[in-house]
Image (cartoon, rainbow, N blue to C red):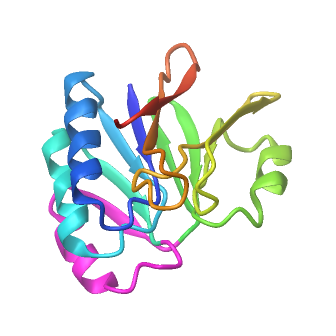
C-alpha cells in the first residue's frame, strides 16, 4: 500500500495523523506531492516507518532544511520526479501544468500531483491519475490523503479527520 498526501502547509497535526494512518495500514511507501512549507512538518513523516518520496512545491522555501530532514528517511527533489516502485513507473509533480500530457503519454502507471487542493482519482488507459487533495485543510476545510494499492491498482481518497 502507498500513502499519498500533498499541500500539508505546516499542519503538523494532520501530517502526524497521515503518518499514523499510513503506518497502521502497513504502507511501504509514502509520497508527498509538495508544499510541506517547513522542515519541522516534513519530519513527522518519519513516523510512517517507510521510505518517503517527495517533490518541492511552489511554497516550499526552506529547501535545504527539507532536504536535510527528509534525507534521513527518504528523498525530496525538484519536480518532476520519476521513479519505479513495485514494478510500476510513477511520475510525481506538484503543479498540474503537464499532467494531462503526462497522462495521455501512457508512459507511467501512476501520475501524482498536488497544488490544486482538490482530490482527483481518474484512470486513462493504463495510467492512474491521483491528486490526494490538501492534507493541511486550510483552503477547503477538508484534510485528505490518498491510498494506492499497487497490486490491485485501486486508489481511494481518505479523510484525515
Between residue 57 and residue 103, name the one nearer to us: 57
Q: Position of residue 7 (x, y in %)?
A: 46, 60
12 or 66: nearer the eye? Answer: 12
State yes or no: residue 103 in magenta. no
Q: Residue at x 22, y 52 (%)?
A: 13
Q: Residue at 23% across / 64% down in the picture?
A: 41
Locate the N terminus and report the quarter of the image it occupies.
top left
Depth check, front residue: 61 or 152: 61
Q: How many marks?
A: 0
Residue 50 in view of the camera: no
Asked if residue 150 is positioned above or below residue 67 in the image, the reply reads above
| Left or right for 22, reference 1 | left
Q: Quadrant of residue 82?
A: bottom right
Q: Locate residue 104, reporting x and y percent.
A: 86, 45
Q: Position of residue 114 (x, y in %)?
A: 57, 57
Task: Using the image as rendered, state which of residue 135 and residue 89 is in the foreground.
Answer: 135
In x, y percent, where is residue 47? 13, 45
Which region shows up in magenta?
57-78
- Quarter of the image for the C terminus: give it: top left
Indicate whether residue 72 is drawn in magenta: yes
Residue 6 against residue 21 in the figure, above or below: below
Q: Is residue 75 left or right of residue 78?
A: left
For the question of whether residue 88 can be seen, the reply is yes
Which residue appears at 58% of the width and 41% of the height?
89
Q: Give the quadrant of residue 154.
A: top right
Would residue 1 be found to the left or right of residue 152 on screen? left
Work out which residue is located at the far top of the displayed protein and give it: 152
Amino acid at each position: 500500500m502507498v500513502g499519498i498526501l500533498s499541500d500539508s502547509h505546516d499542519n503538523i497535526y494532520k501530517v502526524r495523523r497521515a503518518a499514523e494512518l499510513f503506518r497502521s495500514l502497513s504502507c511501504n511507501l509514502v509520497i508527498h506531492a509538495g508544499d510541506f512549507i517547513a522542515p519541522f512538518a516534513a519530519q513527522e513523516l518519519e513516523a510512517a516507518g517507510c521510505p518517503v518520496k517527495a517533490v518541492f512545491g511552489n511554497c516550499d522555501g526552506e529547501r535545504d532544511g527539507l532536504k536535510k530532514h527528509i534525507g534521513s528517511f527518504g528523498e525530496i527533489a525538484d519536480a518532476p520526479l520519476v521513479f519505479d516502485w513495485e514494478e510500476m513507473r510513477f511520475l510525481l509533480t506538484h503543479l498540474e501544468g503537464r499532467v494531462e500530457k503526462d497522462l495521455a503519454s501512457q508512459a507511467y502507471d501512476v501520475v501524482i500531483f498536488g497544488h490544486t487542493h482538490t482530490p482527483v482519482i481518474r484512470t486513462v488507459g493504463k495510467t492512474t491519475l491521483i491528486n490526494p487533495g490538501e492534507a493541511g485543510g486550510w483552503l477547503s476545510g477538508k484534510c485528505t490523503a490518498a491510498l494506492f494499492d499497487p497490486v490491485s491498482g485501486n486508489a481511494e481518497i481518505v479523510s484525515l479527520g
